[in-house]
Amino acid sequence: MYQHLEGDLTRVEDRLKEALKCENKELQDAAMHLLSAGGKRLRPVFVLLAGTFGDYDFDRLSKVAVGLELIHMASLVHDDVIDDASTRRGTPTVKSLYGNRMSMYTGDFIFAQSLQVLTSIQDHRFHAILSSAIHRMTLGEIEQIKDLYNLDQTVRHYLHRIRRKTAFLIEMSCVLGAHATNAIPAHCNALRRFGYFAGMAFQITDDLLDLTSTKERLGKPVGSDLRQGNVTLPVLLALREKETGAELRNLITPDMSEQAVEHAVHLIKSSSGLSNAQKLADRYLVKASESLAMLPPTSARLSLAALATYIGKREH
C-alpha cells in the first residue's frame, strides 16, 4: 500500500528506538518490550503520506511521526493497567511482566519522550494542536471509565467518546503531516476529514473484531471488551432489539462469568448489532474516500484509499 515509504518507515522505527533509550535499564527494557511487540504503525504512515502533499521533509516529518506514535504507545501501557490486560498482540503486556506501578511510570516515561520529540519542532501551531489532541484523548479515556457497564448510553455518546479516544489522534496524524510540509489549506482540510472518518471506522472495526475474530488473530481473548465492561457499538445496537436486549442486560454485569461472556457474544452475533455497526463503519469509510477527491491524484492518495479499504477489511 505504501512501498515507496518503506525506507522512511524503517528510519522512523529506528528513531522510536532511539527515543526510548534511558539511563534506567528496567524502564528502558519495559518501554522497548512494548515497541518490540510491533504494531500497525498507522499513525506514522498517515504522517508520512500526508507529508507528500507539501514539501516533503523527512527530518521534520519523522519528529511528528515518532512523537504521535509514542503518545499512542503511552496510552496503550496505561490502558493495559486499567483493563488488567495480560496480553496484547499475542505477547505479555508491560503490566503483566513489570507490574502496575512500573507500567504506569513506563507510560509516563514514553509520554514524556513524545513531548521531548514534538517540542523540538519550533512551530506554535503544532504545540496548540498537540495539546488539544492530548486533552481530548484524556477526556475520552475518562469517559470510557465512567461508562463501564453503562447499558443506557446513547450511540451519539459512544461516537463522541471514540472520536476523542481514538479518531482524533489519527486525524491529527494527517493534519500535522500536512502542516509539517506546508501543504495548502485545502489539502490540509481534506486530510483532516480523511483522518477523522478513517479513525472512526478504525475504532468501530476494532469493536467488531473483538466479537467476531479469534484469540489467535486478536492476540487476546474474544469478548475482552465485554469482560472489562466496555460497552461498544455492536453491543449498544444489540441491546436495542427485543429479541436480545433484555437477556443481554441480565448478562452484562461486573461479575460476568466466562459462560455469561460466551452467551452474550452469541446473542450479539444472533442480533443485527454486528451488521448495523458494520454499515456505520462502511459509511465512515465512504466519507473518508470521498475526502480524498480534493487531493491531487498521486501515489500517496492511492495509498490513503488503500488504507481505508484495509481498515474496513482487516482481521486483527
Image (cartoon, rainbow, N blue to C red):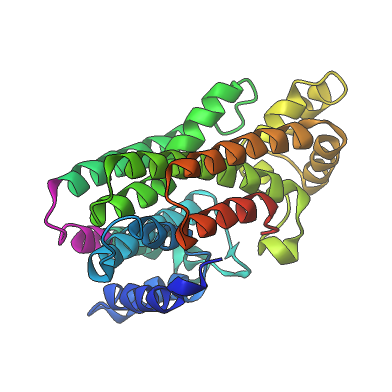
For residue 117: magenta?
A: yes
The quarter of the picture where residue 51 lies is bottom left
| Residue 150 x/y as whole percent | 60, 26
Residue in view at x 61 percent, y 44 percent: 228
The quadrant of the picture occupied by the N terminus is bottom right
| Residue 311 x/y as whole percent | 61, 52
Q: Is residue 234 above or below residue 39?
A: above
Q: Nearer the viewer, residue 124 or 214?
A: 124
For residue 239, say whether it is visible: yes
The quarter of the picture where residue 135 lies is top left
The residue furthest front is: 297
The quarter of the picture where residue 239 lies is top right
* Magenta stretch in the rendered image: 112-124
Q: Nearer the viewer, residue 302 or 153?
A: 302
Q: Is residue 293 above or below residue 314?
A: above
| Residue 232 x/y as whole percent | 63, 36
Q: Nearer the viewer, residue 245 or 209?
A: 209
| Residue 32 x/y as whole percent | 40, 76
Task: State left or right for residue 93 relative to residue 181.
Answer: right
> Could you tell me how many numbered marks the image carries?
0
Residue in view at x 52 percent, y 60 percent: 303
For residue 259: magenta?
A: no
Residue in view at x 35 percent, y 39 percent: 189
Task: State left or right for residue 130 relative to residue 168.
Answer: left
Q: Of helix, strand and loop, which mostly describes the magenta segment?
A: helix
Q: Nearer the viewer, residue 227 or 278?
A: 278
The quadrant of the picture occupied by the C terminus is bottom right
For residue 138, say whether it is visible: no
Q: Is residue 114 above or below residue 164?
A: below
Q: Is residue 183 above or below residue 267?
A: below
Residue in view at x 84 percent, y 31 percent: 271
